[in-house]
Image (spheres, helix red, strand yellow):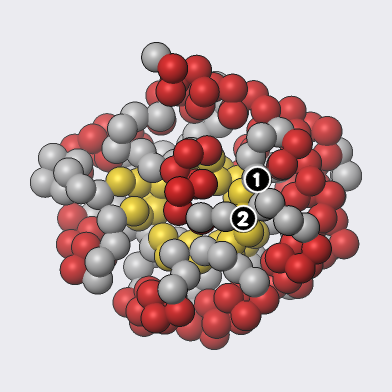
């Protein structure tokens, strides 16, 4: 699967926090069943890396990436485990360079004009915008698109089923969030709820694309 093309088409990036790697496959299947075959498994838990490897080796037709990547070692380990993209909460030139050298899409967090310019100078044109609800949300993204018309964003933080439609503007590449795959539902093995949340969101994306 073409990672960037698929993310752009689906326009949703579930942020997935897994406490037990044994839940990774069922979580991935639940996302797929809801029409969102993408998962950003964060490295916030000890099970994150093992969960990435489990999904990468155990299931087809899903894009699995690593989120909350803070160091070069984490990026290296995640890519070795099978991560197909890497997401940073902020900007780190060394991690970005490592990913680019390995040919792995990387989406660093950038919320200021300075950060955006540094990222652009490294050849990036899709950036995470986090936490979106703190740094101005859609209003900020629209304003930043004035001087940076060729940059698109993945806002994360503040989006959910009630306001997703508002986030689906042309300047937004995709919308990230944990509401698509709540940690509590994974722990409770309530996978049907994850499928339902994804199906609802995928339906909203399709409605917006038609309008």
Rounded to the nearest whole Å, what is the CA distance between mark 2 and mark 1?
Answer: 6 Å
Quadrant of image for the C terminus: top left
- Whether residue 81 is visible here, answered yes or no, is yes
Instruction: Answer above or below: position of 205 versus 97.
Output: above
Q: Nearer the viewer, residue 60 or 131?
A: 60
Count neighbours of disc 2 (C-alpha within 10 A) and say few if under 14, some if 14 to 19, many if 20 or more: many
- Residue to which mark 2 is pinned: 63
Contact between marks 2 and 1 (CB within 8 A): the answer is yes
Q: Residue furthest bottom?
A: 73
Name the residue rendered at 52%, 64% in the picture: 85
Name the residue rendered at 22%, 63% in the picture: 120
Position of residue 8 measured from the top left corner of the image (x, y, whole percent): 44, 43
Name the residue rendered at 38%, 42% in the picture: 173
Mark 1 or mark 2, which is nearer the start of the sequence? 1
Instruction: Answer above or below: position of 138 versus 32.
Output: above
- Residue to which mark 1 is pinned: 37
């Amino acid at each position: 699967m073409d990672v960037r093309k698929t993310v752009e088409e689906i326009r949703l990036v579930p942020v997935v926090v897994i406490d037990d790697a044994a839940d990774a496959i069922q979580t991935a299947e639940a996302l797929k069943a809801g029409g969102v075959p993408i998962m950003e498994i964060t490295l916030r838990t000890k099970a994150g890396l093992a969960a990435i490897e489990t999904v990468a080796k155990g299931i087809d037709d899903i894009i699995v990436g690593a989120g909350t990547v803070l160091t070069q070692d984490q990026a290296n380990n995640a890519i070795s485990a099978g991560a197909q993209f890497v997401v940073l909460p902020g900007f780190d030139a060394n991690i970005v360079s490592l990913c680019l050298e390995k040919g792995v899409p990387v989406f660093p967090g950038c919320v200021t004009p300075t950060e955006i310019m540094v990222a652009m100078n490294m050849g990036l044109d899709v950036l995470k915008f986090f936490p979106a609800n703190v740094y101005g949300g859609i209003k900020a993204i629209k304003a930043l698109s004035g001087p940076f018309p060729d940059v698109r964003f993945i806002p994360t933080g503040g989006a959910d089923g009630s306001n997703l439609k508002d986030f689906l503007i042309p300047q937004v590449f995709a919308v990230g969030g944990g509401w698509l795959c709540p940690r509590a539902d994974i722990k409770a093995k309530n996978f049907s709820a994850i499928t339902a949340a994804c199906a609802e969101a995928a339906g909203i994306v399709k409605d917006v694309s038609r309008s």
